[in-house]
Amino acid sequence: MEKMISSITGAKKRRVSSLVKALPVAIAASLLFAGCAAPAADDSSSSSETKTGGAKVAVIGGMASDGFWTTVKNGVEAAGLAVQGAGGEVTWLPLKSYENLGPDAGDLVRNAIGLGVDAIVIADWVPEAEDPAIKDAVAAGIAVFIYNAGGVTAMENTGAQMYIGSDELIAGTAGGEYFAEKGAKNVICVNTTPGSVNQETRCQGLAEGLAANGGVGTQLPLPASSFGDPAAIAQAVKGALVADPTIDGVLTIGAQDSDAAASGIEQAGLTGKVLLGTFDLSENVLARIADGTQLFGIDQQPYLQGYMATSMAWQYVQYGILPAERVFLTGPALVTEANIASVQAGVTAGAR
């Protein structure tokens, strides 16, 4: 298995300690959800939150062309099969683009409210744009589960039931520390969805991890329209490297962007000289780690995010079941050349 992040000190250790309390309960819950074809409800044990009919869950996700969200959707669909077998319903509502991320996500929440669902699963990417809609859902009696982005803060600010995902600040910090460990001093964080809280936090963590080890991390923000445009990303990375020869590391916020960044580094003639890291995994990322042209990938287990968020939301509105701890951490975990073999099968199957 991949190496779980452990090089976190001081306040970060205390933060991790409080968050990972969720894991024992959540792991036990996952065993329940893995076979969640539900038995008939017992009237003697029903609560005001249980339903006599099949509960309906809407899950809001990213673009269809985004490989990360394809993996999340795979997890949602796997959970959805069990939900459907128990008489429930799961609806997947994807974003069409990231150019108007927050407002579009808020509109999808309102669409879900209009569908009459019992629970909504949503990533809180841009709180100022999404939170009013999320709070409307909560006020309407709809159970909201935050996943992927927003963390504990979003859960508390919106009245959501749980957060399922990674801790982005810890993940970014771990990446910065690993870059520093391998000798990098000046690393750029390529952000193709600027304004998204989880991506901004990742870049912040990178800077903090490097700063603690005498390095510098800066953000290279690109227009949201560049997401999924490998030529634009590659050109931007090449341009940054040519303009500043002291840059010795590049971190991308997603596996697709990592492919483009690798091309930009190659075009600049710096393959093997400029270290490359990324959030999230793909077969291309693992292949580069194996051949030594990429340093690492930071995994947050998107399949698990989709599966557990969907399962937990349905179990809650159907039976009133909720883990005692309200945080389920799916990452971060650092994948390097030392451990890629253990995760390769999952990536190939679309589960990592």
Image (spheres, rainbow, N blue to C red):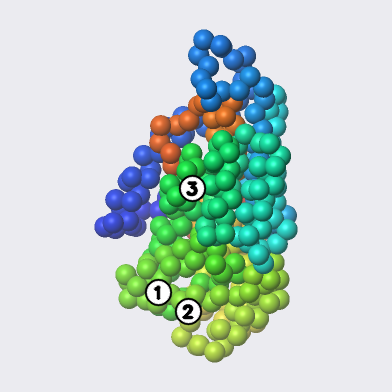
For the question of whether residue 259 can be seen, the reply is no
Residue 244, position as x, y percentages in the image: 50, 88
The numbered mark at residue 158 is: 3
> Mark 2 or mark 1, which has the lower sequence index?
1
- Residue 318 coordinates in the image, percent (x, y): 59, 26
Task: Return the residue at label 2.
Answer: 248
Circle 3 sits in a helix, a strand or a loop, which is it? Answer: helix
Q: Nearer the viewer, mark 3 or mark 2?
A: 3
Question: At which x and y percent is residue 219?
Answer: 49, 75
> Earlier along the polypeptide chain: callout 1 or callout 3?
3
Residue at point 38% right, 43% down? 20
Which residue is at 67% across, 67% downward?
Answer: 99
Question: Label 2 amino acid?
Answer: Asp
Instruction: Tell me the residue that label 1 is attached to.
Output: 183
For label 3, count other residues whose C-alpha is less than 10 Å away and answer few (under 14), some (14-19) or many (20+): many
The residue at 43%/75% (across/down) is 217
Q: Is residue 269 above or below residue 18?
A: below
Image-quadrant location for residue 38: top right
Instruction: Assess whether mark 1 and mark 2 are in contact (beta carbons under 8 angstroms).
Output: yes
